[in-house]
């Protein structure tokens, strides 16, 4: 059986353990160079040719820095490897003219690496990491006789142009200065400025400077700048982070317009409802995050997403998850009775240019209430009022309630490691409950030695969720906890939040835009409507069906339930199901 060895260099602390992995390796004791010390890094290197996969080094390492992974038999030769004992990618997708191809998989499984290769930023080395490829000749030869041969040949000769929207749009103001209008007019090579700005609702920010934009505004500007450029192949890395539901559907329309114009589009997306509406076909990536990733065969979007949810890829005969993800259809619930955990009167919050009004409501023990609506409509303002960060202009909130609050934007200027951060900001860190119920499922053990400032968006989000849940509170308030998390991590976070609030007889209020996540975690919901940036109104918490019907009715959008998995799926506008559900007034709960 083939295998790869992964050494996490952030965890490895040879000075603290005196190379226990080398000392206990049977191969070394038999005078084989199975594990040696790298002269430059002073960290161990494991020879995968000599390693027998006994697992002794894995068990002996006190920092969990070593992982031995047995690979499936039929995955073939690697496409790219970053170095000895580092990540390895198997397979590449093949794009089709006039279609949108989606990539679905966990973080750290190779999706961004695929985009780098296909966009021409990274020449694959086919596992030969000792020599950096200088040209595309070996790649073209490797794919001889396939569509990818023509693609890479044209790419290497400069005959095709690729356009990439990066993942971390919050970094754009550091590299792009000036007003939004100047940026977009300068890149408008397709004469689509008016169309794109209208569909992405950018007219009101055109004269603002890049450094003054919110995360959602930066995301829409990044999408617009990508679509406006002339290219043959377009790559979008997580285009819906920080966008509300309406903006996500508008982004779907704009990105799909590229395919309608004959362009080829590849999208990485973790919002299943958005991915479903956006893609014509998908590839699923499976393997071990940080270890290796394998690209599945091309699948129809519905069947592919359902296979991912069920955890079994029939064509590959591979099980990628022990248990399927289960969605349930909740019937309308009766009004809660009994003592409320928290209550508040009608609230008003007046700013110079914005006003929020909130209907009186109550939050009960052991329930999760979600809040959804457009960006700039007052959700975060309400969260801050409930958390005591901001005072209402009129109205009252139960002062006795203790609230733990995770804000929307997470500050990353902490000096120190994740372990240092947890010592300082997670009161229950070190307890058995924190370790088993929070730290282990959120996979924070793998991050302890990393500097907080070097964490990815998803890693930082998991850390912030854990720190919030570690506090002794009655209401746990999360503002957009799914940003930068993959599908698996979103649902794990949902289960962790549910388990903690029920074990503590507490409650949670969650502000988010992922319909699938909202459907998975909600007991009741609040709807925010109004005019973004001017005035907003929040309903009292009601059952999810009633809230969703109101919210989606305002957007003129309908969802149905997938027959097999019961996951929410968006209907195409003016389709038969869309018209039928609107006539019935059921915007959310029909099955297809």
Image: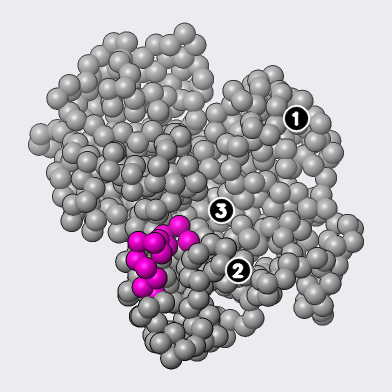
Let me know if residue 20 is in the magenta part: yes
Mark 2 vs mark 1: which is more N-terminal? Answer: 2
* Among numbered discs 1 and 3, the one appearing first in the sequence: 1
Q: As drawn, is 102 to the left or to the right of 362? A: right
Where does the image place residue 348, in percent across and percent down from the top left? 33, 14
Q: Residue at x 73, y 56 (%)?
A: 121
Res 443 seen here: no
The magenta span reads: 9-21
Residue 470, given in percent of the width and then of the height, sits at 24, 44
| Residue 340 marker | none
* Cα distance between the residues tagged 2 and 3: 27 Å
Q: Residue furthest left?
A: 338
Left or right: 13 with respect to 315?
A: left
From the top left corner, tell me how far across and down residue 54 is, in percent: 39, 85
Question: Which residue is pictured at 82% across the width and 78% down the height?
Answer: 141
Helix, strand or loop at mark 2? loop
Find disc 1 in the rendering and name its residue: 183
Please name the residue that numbered disc 3 is placed on.
269
Q: Residues within 10 Å of mark 1 (few under 14, many from 20)?
A: some
Residue 83: mark in rendering = 2
**Image vertical order of residue 456 relative to residue 346, above or below:** below
Query: In the displayed structure, does residue 255 sit left or right of residue 472?
Result: right
Is 376 within the magenta? no
Of labels 1 and 3, the one closer to you: 1
In three-dimensional space, the C-alpha distance between marks 1 and 3, rounded to whole angstroms, equals 25 Å
């Amino acid at each position: 059986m083939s295998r790869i060895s992964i050494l996490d260099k952030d965890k490895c602390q040879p000075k603290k353990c005196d190379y226990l992995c080398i000392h206990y390796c049977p191969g070394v004791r038999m005078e084989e160079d199975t594990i040696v010390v790298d002269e430059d890094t002073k960290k161990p290197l494991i020879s995968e040719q000599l390693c027998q996969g006994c697992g002794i080094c894995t068990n002996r390492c006190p920092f969990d820095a070593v992982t031995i992974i047995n690979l499936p038999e039929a995955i073939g030769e690697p496409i790219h490897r970053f170095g000895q004992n580092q990540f390895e990618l198997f397979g590449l997708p093949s794009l089709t003219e006039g279609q949108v191809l989606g990539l679905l998989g966990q973080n750290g499984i190779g999706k961004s690496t695929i985009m780098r290769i296909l966009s021409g930023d990274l020449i694959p080395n086919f596992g030969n990491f000792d020599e950096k490829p200088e040209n595309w000749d070996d790649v073209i030869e490797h794919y001889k006789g396939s569509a990818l041969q023509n693609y890479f040949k044209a790419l290497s000769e400069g005959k095709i142009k690729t356009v990439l929207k990066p993942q971390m749009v919050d970094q754009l103001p550091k590299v792009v200065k000036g007003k939004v209008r100047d940026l977009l007019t300068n890149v408008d090579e397709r004469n689509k400025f008016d169309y794109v700005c209208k569909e992405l609702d950018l007219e009101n920010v055109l004269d603002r400077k890049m450094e003054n934009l919110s995360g959602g505004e930066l995301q829409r500007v990044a999408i617009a700048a990508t679509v406006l450029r002339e290219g043959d192949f377009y790559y979008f890395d997580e285009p819906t982070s920080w966008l509300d539901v309406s903006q996500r559907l508008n982004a779907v329309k704009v990105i799909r317009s590229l395919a309608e114009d004959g362009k080829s589009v590849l999208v990485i997306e973790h919002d299943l409802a958005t991915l479903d509406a956006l893609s014509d076909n998908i590839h699923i990536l499976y393997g071990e995050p940080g270890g290796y990733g394998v690209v599945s065969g091309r699948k129809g979007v519905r069947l592919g997403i359902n296979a991912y949810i069920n955890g079994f890829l029939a064509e590959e005969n591979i099980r990628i998850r022990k248990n399927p993800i289960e969605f349930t259809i909740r019937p309308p619930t009766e009004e809660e009775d009994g003592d409320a955990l928290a209550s508040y009167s009608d609230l008003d919050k007046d700013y110079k240019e914005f006003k929020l009004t909130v209907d009186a409501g109550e939050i009960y023990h052991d329930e999760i209430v979600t809040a959804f609506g457009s960006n700039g409509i007052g959700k975060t303002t309400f969260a801050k009022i409930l958390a005591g960060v901001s005072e209402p202009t009129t109205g009252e909130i139960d002062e006795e309630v203790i609230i733990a609050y995770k804000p929307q934007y997470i500050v990353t200027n902490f000096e120190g490691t994740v372990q240092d951060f947890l010592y300082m900001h997670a009161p229950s860190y070190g307890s058995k409950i924190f370790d088993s119920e929070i730290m282990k499922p959120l996979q924070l053990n793998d991050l302890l030695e990393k500097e907080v400032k070097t964490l990815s968006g998803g890693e930082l989000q998991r850390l912030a969720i854990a720190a919030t849940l570690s506090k002794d509170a009655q209401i746990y308030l999360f503002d957009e906890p799914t940003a930068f998390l993959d599908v698996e991590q979103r649902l794990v976070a949902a289960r962790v939040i549910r388990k903690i609030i029920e074990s503590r007889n507490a409650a949670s209020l969650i502000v988010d835009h992922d319909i699938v996540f909202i459907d998975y975690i909600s007991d009741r919901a609040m709807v925010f409507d109004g005019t973004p940036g001017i005035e907003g109104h929040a309903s009292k918490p009601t059952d999810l069906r009633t809230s969703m019907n109101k919210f989606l009715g305002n957007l003129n959008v309908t969802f149905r339930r997938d027959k097999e998995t019961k996951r929410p799926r968006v209907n195409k506008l003016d389709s038969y199901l869309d018209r039928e559900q609107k006539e019935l007034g059921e915007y959310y709960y029909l099955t297809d």
